[in-house]
Amino acid sequence: MAYNKKNKGVVRCIDKMGRVVIPKEIRKDLGMDIGSPVEITVFGNQVQIRKYVEYCIICGKPQAGAEMLKIHDKKICDKCSGLIGKYTVTGELPPVDEDEEDE
């Protein structure tokens, strides 16, 4: 089956090492390069492979391509690490701007 952007379905065989090749066109569409991490999830009898995106453990927002602060194998986005820094200096949590737009 040829790759087509409408159905994005393609059939691939598992090799002797248990690997499956994701077609170049699909990797390009998803912005995946050699060495890009993928997340593999099993739902019943289905296997889902998707581009891995890290999330901030505090705000829960995806941080695709962003540098994150790593503390004991947990990652925090720049915005939340800034709030934590203000908290540790003053002992009070800074006010959160509810009207701020998501990036």
Image (cartoon, rainbow, N blue to C red):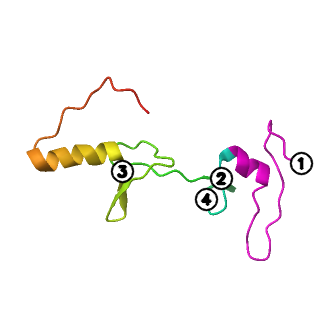
Name the disc covering residue 57, or none.
3
Instruction: Give the residue type at disc 1.
Output: Ala
Q: Nearer the viewer, mark 3 or mark 4?
A: 4
Q: Residue at x 75, y 64 (%)?
A: 20
Q: Give the residue at mark 1.
A: 2
Whole-angstrom CA distance, mark 3 to mark 4, is: 21 Å
Residue 93 is situated, as x and y percent measured from the top left of the image, at 16, 40
In screen coordinates, is 56 left or right of 24?
A: left
**Spatial distance from mark 1 to mark 2, Cα to Cα?**
19 Å
- Is mark 3 in CB contact (under 8 Å) with mark 4? no
Q: Nearer the viewer, mark 1 or mark 2?
A: 2
Stretch in magenta? 1-29
Q: Residue under label 2, please give it.
A: 32
Q: Give the mark nearer the N terminus: 1 vs 2.
A: 1
- Indicate the secondary structure of the residue bearing disc 1: loop
User: Is 13 above or below relative to 80?
Assistant: below
Residue at numbered disc 4: 36
- Magenta stretch, main secondary structure, is loop
Residue 86 in the magenta stretch? The answer is: no
